[in-house]
Amino acid sequence: MDYEFLRQEGIRQLERMTGGQWTDYNAHDPGITILEQLCYALSDLGYRTGYEIPDLLADGGGDPYRSLHLPAEILTSHPVTLADLRRLVLDVEGVKNAWVEPATAEALKLYYLPVEQELRLAPKDGASEPVRLRGLYRVLIEASERSQDTQVRARVARRLYQSRPLCEDFAEISVLEPQLIQVEAIVEIAPVDDPAALLNEIGRAIADEISPPVRFATLSQTLDAGVSVDATFEGPRLERGFISDEALASATLRTVIHTSDLMRAITSVVAVRAVSRIRVSTGGAKEDWSLPVDPARVPRMNFDASMITLMSAGRVIARSKPEGAPDAPRGAGDSALAVPAGRDRNAGAYTSVQQHLPMLYGIGEMGLPDSAPPARKAQARQLAAYLMFFDQLLASSFAQLAHVKDLFSHGGDTRTYFTQALDQPGLRLEEICALDDGHRARLIDLVESPAEVASLERKNRFLNHLLARFAEPIGDHEAASTPSSQAERARRKQSLLQRYPRISSARGTGFDCLAPGGLANMSGLEERLRISLGLAGDEEITVVEHILLRPMSGDETQERPAPTDAPTEVPPAVLSAAREKDPYSLRLTFVLPEGVGRFSDPAFKQLVEQALRAETPAHLTPYVLWMAADAWAAFRTAHGQWLQKRREVLAATLGVNLEGQSS
């Protein structure tokens, strides 16, 4: 961008190349004038490279973020921890609070018989070993106080199964019945203008202490609290805002109500001086100190049966039932970070240096007068033709800058060099060179042929750069020495980048058990493997999660072969020839068709097995099973039928309506 430096460097090079054969290099020399115009054009190009990145990416009026994933998309993830699952449930309409915890041993009573190597639903003898499955959870829901919605459980189930962690499942999803708590309190207050409003405020403070709500925060509130952007967007993406770890920790499920805690909540209200007396009950005896809560229920203040008395200077100011507050309205607030707007700077617009040369040169828009002799006109055309070489190089450089958005895009274009014709109305350049479509095609072929290996290699290097920004392995599994193989490699990387928010965040997420099976409903791991390995056509992978194969309610009554000498009161085995005590927990099997497409190549099969094991989350144990054609066909049919049956049973259990969903 230093015009003076460019000019001095140009003159230095001229002196080196021409020696004493040229002029004195002063400003009046036409060669120096042309050099100065070229230096100006270069400085203009340098100036434009300094445009803000959003402006360069918005060139041509496009969306500057079409190939950039925004923070809410790329920094969030599907649920990984129990806290993540709890946040997901809390985001469902009609849910006030929720708790997610490992399922108890009673959720599925399973026994292993080491001698027979069998799994049964009931013990057979003293040698039977109870099996505690891992990866099973129970979800307890507290519905909103004023909600009469009977579909809360079904909505929670749908939300959870859309983001179900891989090799994990929900043994129980239930809405807890409320245990109504009556509160009787006498409160000493300072003089106030509106005793009724104070009484309701005290009632809400008591209700929040008995059944703490979970507070959602907006993005600005979270950032103002000093939380970093990365930490703010950690975990699942929510519709209602953000929930801090502190908010989750404080909203525990109460197992006992202490009057001392209620007194502390009351005295935190402004204008309250003291609590003279407080008692709690559930309709029976009134307790002065504490009241136990049924473990299978959630406590909730009974506003209709509670009574609060306000006293001031020995006089009763108000005595009434407090009124409950309405449910907080749903709303996401400012959940998205503001991004800089892109301004279309038309970075590729190029004006020929011929437009800026003195008019007496005769090559500008004014040209030469009709009276000029033919030799003079020929000289002007000759100079214009000479300058077109410089113009074309500069015009292509400006075009390259205008296509920065394409260089760093995960779109379908594989070009890395760009050019533009010298469309300069008024200069009559078409009299020197035909600036038609054929000329434009020749320009493209001169800078880069899209079918060349070198061109595709450059595109792959750009895509490698974009993948490296996510610390993503390149995944160049095979040598790519032909245009078709290089193009396939680029296509695979582009697909990975386009789907990266899902592929990255759902890497440890299973398929939706309540949705129809098919390519639109697969685990995040399976989707990632299909793209990274470039599988197509019949090259399929089916991920079987062992936890979903566990015995379900009703399996003990199914007809199955049993030894004739087995006692009738002992149910037959649900799994025979068991290789281990627990074949279900945190295990999965990749099932693939043998000999199909590239699966017939031993080297590619080995590569696939390595990729399967490398991509599987570290806490899971993967198995790989190759099936011959006939076995594969039978497996696919049986697997599809099993998925559909399981989906129907699960939906019926959870009260989910499957109408309108095709199988």
Image: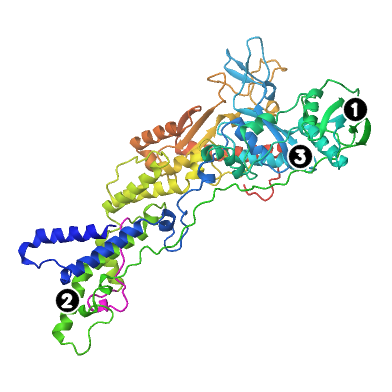
Looking at the image, tell me whether mark 2 or mark 3 is earlier in sequence order.
3
Disc 3 is placed on an element classified as loop
Q: Can residue 257 be seen in this view?
A: no
Gap in angstroms between the C-alphas marked 1 and 3: 22 Å
Which stretch is magenta?
Answer: 416-435
Q: Residue pushed farthest left? A: 20
Residue named by callout 2: 382
Residue 182 x %, y %: 87, 30
In the picture, the quarter occupied by the N terminus is: bottom left
Residue 245 as seen in the image, left or right of residue 307: left
State the CA–CA distance, disc 2 to disc 3. 84 Å
User: Are the residues tagged 1 and 3 within 8 Å (C-beta)?
Assistant: no
Q: Which of 534 and 230 is in front in this view?
A: 230
Camera-near label (2 vs 3) is 2
Alpha-carbon distance for marks 2 and 1? 106 Å
In the rendered structure, which disc, 1 or 3, sits on the residue that comes first in sequence? 3
> Looking at the rendered structure, which numbered label has been put on residue 144?
3
Pointer 1 residue: 283
Residue type, mark 2 in image: Gln
- Which quarter of the figure has residue 385? bottom left
Report helix, strand or loop for mark 2.
helix
Crowding near the residue tagged with mark 1, few <14, some 14–19, many ≥20 C-alpha atoms within 10 Å: few
Q: Which of marks 2 and 1 is in front?
A: 2
Secondary structure that dominates the magenta span: loop
Q: Is residue 346 magenta?
A: no
**Label 3 CA crowd tier, 10 Å (few <14, some 14–19, many 20+):** some
The residue that appears at 67% across and 48% down in the rendered structure is 331
The picture places residue 455, in percent across and down from the top left corner, at 29, 53
Few, some or many C-alpha atoms within 10 Å of disc 2 (few <14, some 14-19, many ≥20)? some
- The answer to whether residue 191 is above or below residue 556 is below
Left or right: 335 with respect to 346? right
Q: Picture coordinates of residue 505 (x, y %)?
A: 52, 40
